[in-house]
Image (spheres, helix red, strand yellow):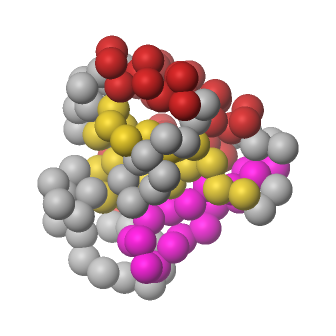
Amino acid sequence: MKIEKTTTQLPADFLDTYAWLDQHLLSHPDTIREFQPAWQAQKYLKNGKMFAYIGFNDKTHHPILTLKLEPSFSEMLREKYPDITPGYYMNKIHWSSINLDGKVPIDTIKNIVDESYGLMP
């Protein structure tokens, strides 16, 4: 899936493919979604603080979900799943990225989202 630079949103086919993820992120109370044109990504914020974003890895062109996580939890996930790596363009200790085309089960991704949301005040 090729992404073209836009100032409004991610491509419709991307949004359709990952609607389940967008819905899960937005199901958490007080979550706001914003499009970040410079990143070509959807940011998810709680009380003005970002806990997740969905976008593309510019190098691999894979769709990714990047989440703020406890460092020990991130380390455990990275050891278990090759498709979870240090946060793309983020602090590598506190953020992890999930290759959405990879082999991390959807239920696991949802649980990781819940952990990320829970870190926000």
Quarter of the picture containing the C terminus is top right
Res 117 visible? yes
- In the picture as drawn, the residue positioned furthest to the bottom comes out as 7
Res 16 visible? no
Name the side, left or right, on which 30 lies relative to 25: right
Task: Residue at 27% x, 57% y: name it.
Answer: 57
Task: Residue at 75% x, 52% y: name it.
Answer: 46
Answer whether residue 40 is magenta in the image: yes
The percent position of residue 62, horizontal first and vertical second, equals: 22, 50
The percent position of residue 56, horizontal first and vertical second, equals: 30, 58
The percent position of residue 8, horizontal first and vertical second, equals: 47, 80
The percent position of residue 35, horizontal first and vertical second, equals: 53, 71
Compared to 72, does 21 lie above or below? Answer: below
Task: Residue at 43% x, 46% y: name it.
Answer: 92
Task: Residue at 41% x, 71% y: name it.
Answer: 39
Q: In the rendered structure, which segment of residues is drawn in magenta? A: 30-46
The secondary structure making up most of the magenta span is strand
Compared to 92, does 50 lie above or below? Answer: below
Compared to 83, does 14 lie above or below? Answer: below
